[in-house]
Image (cartoon, rainbow, N blue to C red):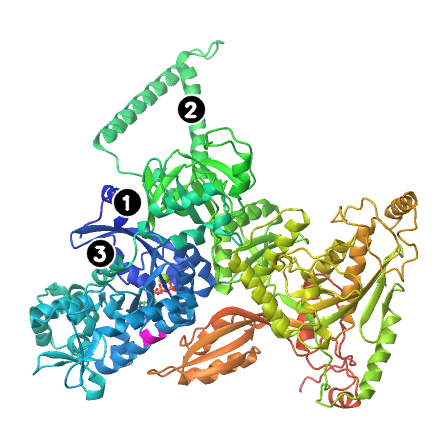
Amino acid sequence: MGHTSLEKIIALQKKTAHIRNLCILAHVDHGKTTLADCLVASNGIISSRLAGKLRYLDSREDEQIRGITMKSSAISLHFATGGVEFLINLIDSPGHVDFSSEVSTAVRLCDGAIVVVDAVEGVCPQTQVVLRQAWLENIRPVLVINKIDRLIAELKLTSQEAYVHLQKILEQVNAVTGTLFTSKVLEERAEKDAGSQSSFTENESGDHVYDWSAGLEETDDSDLYFSPDRGNVVFASAIDGWGFSIHQFAEMYSQKMGIRSSVLLKTLWGDFYLNAKAKKIMKGAQSKGKKPLFVQFILDNIWSMYDAVVTRRDKEKVEKMMTSLGLKVMSRDLRHSDPKVLLSAICSQWLPLSQAVLSMVCEKLPSPAEISAERVEKLMSVGARRFDSLPDKTQELKKAFLDCSADETAPVIVFVSKMFAVDSKALPQNKQRPLTHEEISQRRELARQRHAEKQAANQSAESLASGDAGGDSIPAPAAAGVTDALCAQTEALSVKTTVEEENKEHFVAFARVYSGVVRKGQKVFVLGPKYDPSLALRALPEGCSVSDVLPSIPHMSYCTVDSLYLLMGRELEELDEVPSGNVLGIGGLEDVILKSATISTSPACPPFTPLNFEATPIVRVAVEPKHPSEMPKLVRGMKLLNQADPCAEVLIQETGEHVLVTAGEVHLQRCLDDLRERFAKIEISSSKPIIPFRETVVRPPRVDMVNEDLGKQQKVAVIHQVKEEQSKNPECVQVDSSGLVSLTTPNKMATVGVRAIPLPEQVTCLLEDNVELIRTMEQFNLSVREGKTLDISQKILDNIQDFKVKLESHLQGHKWRNAVDHIWAFGPRRCGPNILLNSIEGYRRPSVWQCLETEKTESSALRDFDNSIASGFQLATLAGPMCEEPLMGVCFSVESWDMKISTPVAQQDSVDEGSQPAELNNEHSEVSPVSSSRSRSKAEAAGSSVDCYGPFSGQLIAAVKEACRYAFQAKPQRLMAAMYTCEIMATAEVLGRVYAVLSKREGRVLQEEMKEGTDMFIIKAVLPVAESFGFADEIRKRTSGLASPQLIFSHWEVIGSDPFWVPTTEEEYLHFGEKADSTNQALKYMNAVRKRKGLYVEEKIVEHAEKQRTLGKNK
Ligand SMILES: Nc1nc2c(ncn2[C@@H]2O[C@H](COP(=O)(O)OP(=O)(O)OP(=O)(O)O)[C@@H](O)[C@H]2O)c(=O)[nH]1
Ligand SMILES: [Mg+2]
């Protein structure tokens, strides 16, 4: 098939109903790019001989070298089936976990997805992740079970065994899909199942047969599950270029055998067999020991083909098969020494993969015009906001989404999911195009003229030199020479600037049009993720458009669409306009969009919901240029990198370090390569990865380090220790034996009593998992304090209620009575996994659960400086005393708060200005708030605010922060390490070595099981992030490439050992010796962090002082 012309694609772009936007998703190495190759080859873009080997969409050099995809890239293909022409906008995505953000950006722009599963490996961790992502974005998936050839060649299964194996894989995939569905979908399906059972009847002999007169024409009712008879599964071997759905075989056999193809469609997959005598298709192949139709009609044929071509190389049989199938191959393929060449030449003709996949895609996946109302609402309602709480004008846009119209009047709505960098040389504007004949002759003429002029000038110069050298006036020809030189100079200059221009990175936005037509030169609004249409609609004049002069609105900017591109894998083609429903590239937006944005001609358009990112960026390194003078280049480069990568984060720490945060080792490597070669173009040195830790407190241990019970004697020691430590503390701090810390502000005006309590593990997890809800609650509380209201959708309110109930159920017991209602704040950053508890007797403040309360309670008076306490807590939880890492799983209970001033006046931190004078714990206060005259208290307050200690709120914040730190230190402290989970697939021979590597790196095996039908073991393990660098490489090396794990951040885990541990009991002294210098992992980690941060590290330089001696030479 020839190359599809640009004009054709432009024409196809206008037929929305015949467009399919889809992406290929799978676990790493399951064959996405190879499959894409076959599809690309069907359009003649690459030769079909190279399909599967070229990996055309892996355009980066490192992608080719490593053999993994690192970015998603799109290509537009043309496909005709049944007389209808389709435009397929295909996006290939990476499967490696480190790049899962690229999957998110791809999925957002699509309506459907091809999920690829390796027939041997089956459902892998990333398969589950991508199915989840597809589900979250409401896009419809179809399945390709790839690498069927491995079942024949590697596992050596018979066709019957292969059938059972394939059934299992399908079950696994459907199980994942099943767990994803909400109860609503499950209920719907149950209803549907009940309805569809009536199509089975029993005949006289008791056999189940299909009653094909009734109910068979019923359209397939569920797109949710994969089943070959629903037409949403293709079996394939991408490397050999073949694939089929049972549709093809149903057609083929219905002609051959005279059975209606609709019947075959329903029976080719499943427990059906052919009763040759009765000429009937019967159910119950398995129980009767018959071959299922799928094996008899399909797999057997493929197996015998492989057998004849690859295993036995039986030329005669091959030729016989080819003639019966009506196939022809080139004679050089027939004679090729590698049987695989012949095999793929035959199979790609017999069962062309692109045909099978693309017709499934066109039939089963929706066109952009079929976008569901549910999906639109999901896209339009950001965060906690309800769709029906959006302004009317915004809600009206829903219709535009649903219409997907390319009308002149339709508003333009475009979503940009990522920005990617292209060399300016690769832009179509800058590409060299072949010269036409006239241009060539013109140029020739010009060159000839120039040559003639030069010669004339030379001649006159010579004659001048030989003649009179004196004289003031410059002769005319010489003057011409000067101007010539000038021209040359300016030319050189302009050449230089164009060279610089050419080296510049250009960003192209990866986008999709949801409504209207985008045109080159059009002016549009660019809406950032935080844009609020209701605010803007109030501020903007009615019916305004982008070309008017408008007031500036937060998170909104304007721009002119510079250029539009058709994305063709490695190439870009320039377009003038793109109608709705298409995926496209937009140039010239780099100054207005950082990573993603919504573009519209209507200010009522809401920003799209943020992308669901699955990977957490966790690996950080500090980078710096080799030559300090190149710092500006690095800064610029990092800015570009930040823009070009959806997941990488770039920050400048307070210390001035430039930090790069990435999802994993492979991602890190790619980012550094990009910085070096592309964005900064300088030599860079990077630090060792900075590993994050968390700090926490635990309950006092019951046994000591040698497993002896800690009795009373130990407790005495603890009290003794506390006393000893107290003498070290400054005088304003008092710590009692139970861990209650009282601290007074420097001006002696306020005293707070704080205690640190470890939170149960489930609570910490719960807080971690519900960050979004906590953030929403915080937003609500903030808006209440500002006197505004925030609409929260009922669903979110239900979730909050649920969260609260769960918290209550985990916080049981005397210690936690009513604790949930008394939560003051979460931290750090107001949403972290630590709690500030209000245990002050007599102080009732509005709870954090305000959004759940229907009526305002009376107790909602805020004491002044309430916010200072919360701020102090935020600071304390942001950086703990062990090594200034954030805290986790700690509850700070404020048990007393005494103030000695009355009404503070005009304090900047007093949040609730309208509130009553603070209700005080009168028993402690020295000045009664009522009796003091107003003026006096004013003077006093003014006096106190200008005293030498600075403003009071600041003092209080600092005091609370310090109190929290002391309270933290009064408890047994522990470090928490970030943990990766990994799933390693390995054969029995290398299992031992995998374990060795795991245990060397402090990993822990959770589970080991054998993969059914293979000789592979699947090992699930956890491993501290701190020990993970080089892990994947080491495993690969030790197992000669047989096992390659993928590391995914999973959770935080308390490190058992106490970094401050010193032997205290007699047994411990006996066991560890006085110095106790056995390795303390926690201390090692802690000191490493402290050293990196430039904090004081208690370390002995000379650990074992021994007298130096000279060793004898012969020893
Ligand atoms: N035996 C066999 N190997 C295949 C098949 N399809 C792909 N492969 C091989 O599997 C490996 C991975 O293929 P890719 O297409 O790069 O896999 P991918 O899913 O794109 O990988 P990532 O993009 O890195 O996630 C390559 O070595 C392919 O040659 C197949 O049908 N059969
Ligand atoms: Mg790939």
**Can you say whether 388 is above or below 1055 in the image?**
above
Q: Name which residue lies at 32% across and 22% down.
A: 455
Q: CA distance from mark 1 to mark 3?
A: 19 Å
State the mark number for residue 42: 3
| Residue under numbered circle 1 | 13
Q: Which residues are magenta?
A: 169-173
Which of these two is toward me, 40 or 586? 586
Q: Which mark is in front, 1 or 2?
A: 1
Please report contact status of discs 1 and 2: CB closer than 8 Å, yes or no.
no
Q: Quadrant of ligand 2?
A: bottom left
Q: How far apart are the alpha carbons under marks 2 and 3? A: 52 Å
Up/down of 288 relative to 384, above or below: below
- The numbered disc on residue 391 is none
Q: Amino acid at mark 1?
A: Gln
**Residue at coordinates 46% horizontally, 36% vertically from top-left?**
559
* Label 3 neighbour load within 10 Å: few <14, some 14-19, many 20+: many
Element type at mark 2: helix
Looking at the picture, how far across and down is residue 205, in whole percent? Answer: 15, 86
